[in-house]
Amino acid sequence: MLTKEQEKRINLLYVEYQKDIKTLIFYVERKFHRFPKGLLKEFRDVFDHISRCYEENATEQYKEENIQKAENHFNRIKLDTYKYVSDYKKQLCKIIATFLFAHSYLSQFF
């Protein structure tokens, strides 16, 4: 049985996912036309550590360790997702800058 504090920490992961990460992952999937394998591994690890907390013979220390590990994996998901979004926006800015430069350069000839 989990303590109220442990339940709260696990619940917070789900709340953060619904509030922030879900939309960003949808954005990443749409832009890259795939679900990044690194994110999939981190999600698997989050749920694996959470599920260990519900083992019948899990001690309080074991539960705490696994909740902490789940939180760490979830933080990696957030960082990786933001990185994918940031990288895409940088690529888009480079394309726009190249277009604007080419347009201004070519406009002197026409």
Image (tube, rainbow, N blue to C red):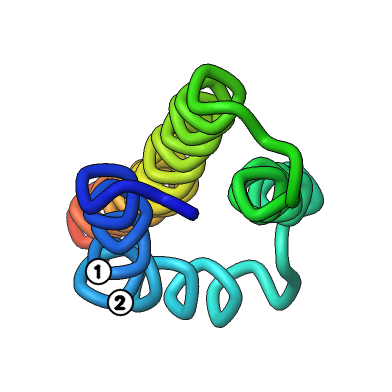
Location of residue 68 in the rendering, given as x and y in whole percent from the top left corner: 45, 25
Give the residue type that dot 1 points to. Answer: Val
Q: Is residue 20 above or below residue 95?
A: below
Inspect this view and state whether residue 95 appears: no
Answer left or right for 45 relative to 17. Answer: right
Inspect this view and state whether residue 73 appears: yes
Element marked by disc 2? helix
Location of residue 107 in the rendering, given as x and y in whole percent from the top left corner: 21, 61
Location of residue 14 in the rendering, given as x and y in whole percent from the top left corner: 36, 67
Q: Where is mark 2, residue-wise?
A: 18
C-alpha gap between disc 1 and disc 2: 5 Å
Answer left or right for 24 relative to 97. Answer: right
Q: Where is mark 1, residue-wise?
A: 15
CB of mark 1 within 8 Å of CB of mark 2? yes
Q: Residue at 20% of width from left, 73% of height from top?
A: 19
**Among the 4 quarters of the image, the one containing residue 8:** bottom left
Give the residue type that dot 2 points to. Answer: Gln
Q: Residue at 61% of width from left, 45% of height from top?
A: 53
Q: In front here: 89 or 12?
A: 12
